Image (cartoon, rainbow, N blue to C red):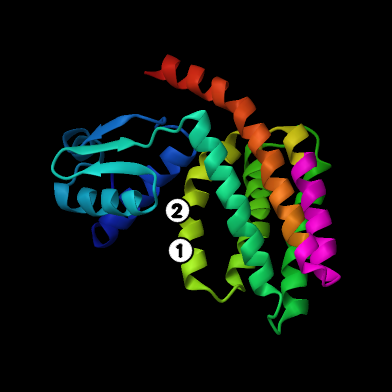
Amino acid sequence: MNLNKSTLSEQIYQILRSDILTQKIPLGEKLTLKHLQERFEVSSTPIREALTRLSQDGLVDYYSNIGVNVISLSEDDLKELYQFMGDLDRLAILYTAGHPEHEAICKELQDAVSVTEKLQNCQDMPEELTSLWIKNSDDFHLIFYKYCNNRKLKTAAETLRSQLTIFSNIYETKQEPQKEIHRMHVKIFEAYKAGAYAEAGDLMKEHLNASLEFALKSFPDMNDLNQRDR
């Protein structure tokens, strides 16, 4: 594989991160330094750097000089993940309440909602448009962290969002979850725009609880697929 030597660790990190988030590398998969060196045709140094970043993202358990295991998540882990993510997203909304750029925040939220609404009307959405839908769905949440003015909150959310994305990348490709997610985003946006910040926060918590149900439904299918791929 040809990689730009000036950014080896960054490129390896991005490739492996994408492979994990899209489950090309499944949950629980063992990755050894030897295998990764053969795949990328590089020394162990940039690979270790990439693995360290993936560990910080909460996507792998990193064992120095041996390799890594992609994280494993049980149904209980999934429930805790979505519950806590709902709490953090709710806090992010409340922290933006006093931000002076209310109109700018609303404009960004509306733009994200408008894109997902437009794409939903496409029949047989191709992969590139599905990826765009997912990106704008994610952006809707990230806008609140962008304006929350709390680095601790942002840091706490980043790791959890990476783990959550593994599942949202699966169920957000389906029409029923897309419609429900869009519907809740619209309700959250309207409440936030009206200055009903507590209501918007409660709706966000409700939204994550509903998304948990979609994640749990995809959990058995993901495990079956991963077992077949091993």
In the drawing, does residue 118 fall left or right of residue 18?
right
Which residue type does callout 1 highlight? Thr
In the drawing, does residue 229 fall left or right of residue 144?
left
Q: Which of the 4 quarters of the picture holds residue 107?
A: bottom right
- Name the residue carrying label 1: 155
Which residue type does callout 2 highlight? Thr
Q: Is residue 89 visible?
A: yes
Whole-angstrom CA distance, mark 1 to mark 2, is 7 Å
Q: Measured from the top left, where is residue 187 in percent x and y?
A: 83, 55
**Mark 1 in CB contact with mark 2 (< 8 angstroms):** yes
Q: Measured from the top left, where is residue 105 in percent x and y?
A: 72, 73
Q: Name the residue rendered at 71%, 75% in the picture.
A: 97
Q: Name the residue rendered at 78%, 58% in the picture.
A: 188
The foreground one among 197 and 143 is 197
Magenta stretch bounds: 179-199
The foreground one among 128 and 70 is 70
